[in-house]
Amino acid sequence: MVEIERKFLVVSLEGCLEKSTEKIKMVQGYLSFDPARTVRVRITDTQAFITIKGKSNKKGDTRLEWEKQIAVKEAQHLLTLCVGSQIKKTRHLVPHQSHVFEVDVFEGDHTGLVIAEVELSSSEEHVDLPHWIGKEVTGDSRYYNSSLAQKLD
């Protein structure tokens, strides 16, 4: 239930997306933007989830996360209750050495934004970064999906 991840801007998709092993379309909205606990509804190509995320630690790489799969029809109803704007993106799973990067290519009002996340087993775990990774934005709340959804409201 504890999520440990680092987040980066992607400087180039060249050499990245062609290594993708899976591509997932996503739409998500937020029922709560409370910084102590955000509540997200997400619908992918075939599944839906409700997720509660706690406040990040000082480094921004660790926080409590609880997620439960729900029926797509339920998630569609919950999306109508969401505040802010919906986030639309395509997630590409890109293996690199011993890790898998989740590369999110945003659409709509956030077209052009590409963020890569990598989940870790500990905050001290070493990650070799591929050449397409740019500036690290771990802990920069401007790049939280919940912040992106609020800015469009």
Image (tube, rainbow, N blue to C red):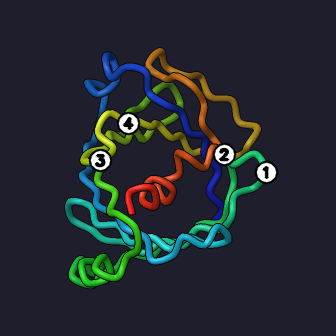
Q: Residue 135: which quarter of the image? A: top right
- Between residue 57 and residue 3, name the one nearer to us: 57
Badge nearest the viewer, 1 or 3: 3
Marking on residue 109: 3
- Under circle 3, the secondary element is helix
Q: Which residue is mark 4?
A: 113
Residue 109 in percent (x, y) is at: 29, 47
Amino acid identity at mark 2? Gly
Instruction: Determine the CA span between mark 3 and mark 2.
Output: 22 Å
Marking on residue 58: 1
- Under circle 2, the secondary element is loop
Residue drawn where x is 68% and y is 47% of the image = 61
Residue 23 in percent (x, y) is at: 25, 43
Residue drawn where x is 24% and y is 78% of the image = 76
Which sits earlier in the primary sequence, circle 2 or circle 4?
A: 4
**In contact (CB < 8 Å): disc 2 and disc 1:** yes
User: As displayed, is residue 112 above or below residue 16?
Assistant: below
Which sits earlier in the primary sequence, circle 3 or circle 2?
A: 3
Badge nearest the viewer, 1 or 4: 4
User: As displayed, is residue 40 above or below residue 22?
Assistant: below
Q: Residue 127: which quarter of the image? A: top right
Instruction: Determine the CA span between mark 2 and mark 4.
Output: 17 Å
Q: Which residue is mark 2?
A: 139
For mark 3, does the 10 Å Cα neighbourhood hold few (<14), some (14 to 19), or many (20 or more) residues? Answer: some
Residue drawn where x is 52% and y is 45% of the image = 143
Amino acid identity at mark 4? Leu
